[in-house]
Image (tube, helix red, strand yellow):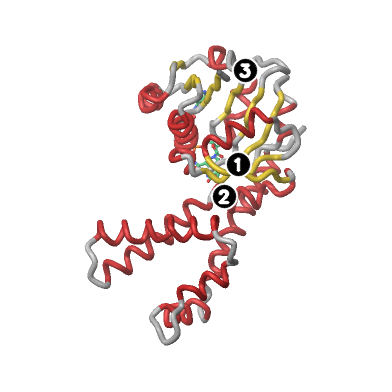
Amino acid sequence: MVQTSVIGCGNMGSALIKGLWRAGNHTVVACDLDPDALESVADYVDRTTSDVSEAAESDVVIVAVKPDIVGAVLDDLDLTPEQTLLSIAAGVSTDYVDARTDANVVRIMPNLAAETRDMAAAVTAEGVTDEVRTLLDDVGEFAEIDERQMDIATAVNGSGPAFVFYLIQAMAEAGVEGGLDEAHAETLAAQTFKGAAETVLRSDRDIEDLIDAVCSPNGTTIEGMDVLWDSDAKANVAEAVAAAEERSAELAAEFNDE
Ligand SMILES: NC(=O)C1=CN([C@@H]2O[C@H](COP(=O)(O)OP(=O)(O)OC[C@H]3O[C@@H](n4cnc5c(N)ncnc54)[C@H](O)[C@@H]3O)[C@@H](O)[C@H]2O)C=CC1
Ligand SMILES: O=C(O)[C@@H]1CCC=N1
């Protein structure tokens, strides 16, 4: 069985750990300097350690620390060309990581839904191996992209869950405003997003067709859609994505020195 280390067991690292645990076919070593972070993932891994050199013994090493810590972690990691290093930090280029390790580097933009094995990940096509594809398959879906597309992918699928959480919250709050209790409103809104997303993924119909399918003539939906079509809702979402993309590009300028 392939052994995977996750260095940095915060929000993203722990989500990956839990997804890999749920997949049931991974041996995982969790590494973090913070004992509380290690404690929070201890039930989902084979071993925890605060020693990066112990994490360096795995076939696949996922570096899941903040972008400004990546360089320091790589300086302490002694890897061989037979090992794979998965770099998930926003804005940190493959070249930046390559210059600091002998391992095969694969840059990935994951997202928080790794925890439930529903992750949407973007992976740079260059350097990706079947071993990495299998790992990504085990925790969700992935798209192989050109590294030049990484800033926009970071905004869409990396930051995207936060944008969608916000929209779910807006729908749930409107439900509460209309008289639903909070728990019901949140469940109904979240399950509606999940069901709509599954429908888009599984249906052969395009999104315009699917909107049409919900809009009964003289019914309720068309009244709501008219409000959305006349609003700036789409432009606002596009602006949020553009702002995240711009920040990713700023980080890239910082972590692209080699
Ligand atoms: N949070 C998210 O939804 C996503 C995050 N990412 C990327 O994942 C990376 C981690 O982000 P988060 O999990 O949100 O950060 P976080 O702050 O929640 O977790 C970082 C973890 O790294 C640990 N750490 C710091 N220095 C360390 C060291 N020298 N050795 C071992 N562990 C160390 C910290 O104790 C902490 O537990 C970032 O580079 C981010 O760009 C990518 C996609 C989505
Ligand atoms: O906000 C961030 O910088 C990280 C990267 C994508 C999602 N979270």
Kindly identify which numbered label has been placed on residue 98: none
Give the residue type that dot 2 points to: Asn
Seen in the picture, residue 192 relative to 82 is either above or below; the reply is below
* Residue depicted at x 61% and y 48%: 154
Q: Is residue 123 found left or right of 66 in the rendered image?
A: right
Q: Position of residue 257 (x, y in %)?
A: 75, 35
Residue 95 visible here: no
Residue at figure coordinates x 45%, y 73% from the top left: 214
- Dot placed on the residue nearer the N-terminal end, 1 or 3: 3
* Labelled disc at residue 109: 1
- Residue at the limit of the structure toward the front, as seen here: 204
- Disc 3: which residue: 77
Q: Earlier in the sequence, mark 2 or mark 1?
A: 1
**Count of marks, rendered view:** 3
- Kindly indicate whether the residue at mark 2 contacts the one at mark 3 (C-beta within 8 angstroms): no
Contact (CB < 8 A) between labels 2 and 1? Answer: yes
Q: Position of residue 141 (x, y in %)?
A: 57, 44
Residue 41 lies, with reference to residue 121, above or below; the image says above
- Disc 1 C-beta below 8 A from ligand 1: yes
Give the Cα separation between the discs numbered 1 and 3.
21 Å
53 left or right of 35 in image? right
SS for dot 2: helix
Quadrant (top left/top right/bottom left/bottom right) for the C terminus: top right
Front residue of 103/50: it is 103
| Residue 13 x/y as whole percent | 49, 32
Which is nearer the eye, 251 or 31?
31
Return the x and y of residue 65 as percentages of the image width and height. Answer: 54, 31
In this figure, which residue is indicated by the disc labeled 2?
157
Task: Determine if residue 41 is in view.
Answer: yes
Structural distance between the alpha carbons of marks 2 and 1 = 8 Å
